[in-house]
Image (cartoon, rainbow, N blue to C red):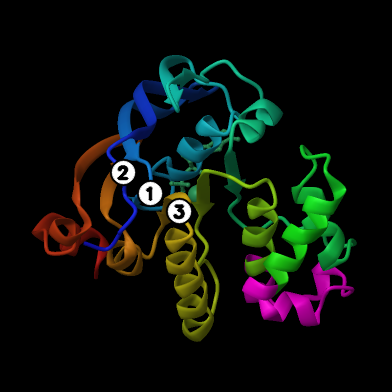
């Protein structure tokens, strides 16, 4: 078993979720559950609705129908900051660090819902221990970091809200293979700290190697789900996503 601290407790349950953008139905009655401590991956082609799923969970987009239950609470109609307060952090596609702010200030912004300054400072130090490249660059403007460093900063910033559930959108996108390996080893370390992870990836091979379970999203619908070890050898997955 990959996850020693996996508990038999549902941290997130998505039931029959529909999301529309104007006339486009981006998600069609999707169902997805995550147990506390799991790494679950959502794989699918460009445009399948992966980002929309994460945005629906973190309330950046509203759902048309269906429910999102987090830690036993219905969060379907909550607002972004409230969801962050409840322990969900979203590390967005394309990193979206604040280019004109320093690494340090980006991390500080990740803690915007918190008020204990001593704890925030201690957590920034913890992120610097976890991401030594960020420590060396703490006063550098985020926009001058490499793509991989920006991705590390985006993850570290998300962790500054002390999440129980981390939503990671395409952390490997556009990065060189060596950096991708580094990012994925960071994700494995995060799992060991007990944070539950929903990992969106186009790189299905890598994602299925570190995940416990996976869901395949095609044109807004979940078409396949199972243990990552089964999906990685499933002929349909191999043909469509593993090249
Ligand atoms: N802000 C938006 N306005 C209109 N359509 C959108 C918007 N964002 C995404 N879409 C559409 O929703 C579908 C799913 O997109 P997305 O969730 O970004 O897919 P993925 O992350 O899997 O590539 C696509 O057809 C996309 O064009
Ligand atoms: Mg996307």
Distance between the Cα atoms at labels 2 and 1?
6 Å
- Answer whether labels 1 and 3 touch (C-beta < 8 Å): yes
Instruction: Classify 107 as above or below 130.
Output: above
Frontmost residue, 122 versus 76: 122
Q: Which mark is residue 37?
A: 1
Q: Which residues are magenta?
A: 129-151
Q: Quadrant of residue 107?
A: bottom right
Check if residue 139 falls in the magenta segment.
Answer: yes
Residue drawn at (63%, 66%), measured in percent from left and top?
Answer: 151
Percent coordinates x, y for residue 12 in the rendering: 40, 32
Instruction: Tell me the residue at 24%/67% (across/down).
Output: 242
Depth check, front residue: 31 or 128? 128
On residue 7, the disc is 2
On screen, residue 209 above or below 48:
below
* Magenta segment, prevailing SS (helix, strand or loop): helix
Q: Is residue 234 left or right of residue 13?
A: left
Sequence order check, earlier mark of 2 and 1:
2
Q: Which mark is residue 235?
A: none
Q: Is residue 84 above or below residue 211?
A: above
Looking at the figure, which quarter contains the N terminus? bottom left
Q: CA distance from mark 1 to mark 3?
A: 6 Å
Secondary element under disc 2, as helix, strand or loop, is loop
């Amino acid at each position: 078993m990959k996850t020693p601290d996996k508990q038999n407790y549902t941290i997130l349950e998505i039931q029959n979720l529909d999301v529309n953008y104007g006339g486009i139905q981006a998600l069609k009655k999707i169902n997805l559950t995550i147990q506390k401590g799991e790494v679950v991956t959502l794989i699918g082609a460009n445009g399948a609705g992966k980002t929309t799923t994460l945005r629906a969970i973190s309330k950046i987009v509203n759902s048309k129908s269906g429910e999102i239950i987090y830690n036993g609470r219905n969060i379907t109609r909550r607002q972004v900051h409230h969801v962050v307060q409840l322990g969900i952090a979203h590390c967005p596609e394309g990193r979206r660090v604040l280019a004109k702010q320093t690494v340090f200030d980006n991390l500080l912004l990740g803690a915007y819902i918190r008020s204990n300054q001593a704890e925030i400072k201690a957590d920034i130090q913890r992120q610097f221990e976890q991401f030594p490249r960020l420590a060396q660059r703490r006063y550098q403007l985020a926009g001058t970091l490499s793509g991989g460093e920006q991705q590390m900063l985006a993850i570290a910033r998300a962790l500054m809200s002390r999440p129980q559930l981390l939503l990671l959108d395409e952390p490997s996108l556009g990065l060189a293979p060596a950096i991708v390996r580094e990012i994925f080893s960071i994700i494995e370390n995060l799992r060991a700290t007990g944070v539950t992870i929903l990992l969106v990836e186009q790189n299905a091979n890598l994602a299925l190697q570190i995940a416990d379970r996976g869901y395949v999203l095609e044109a807004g619908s979940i078409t396949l789900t199972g243990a990552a070890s089964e999906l990685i050898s499933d002929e349909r997955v191999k043909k469509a996503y593993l090249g």
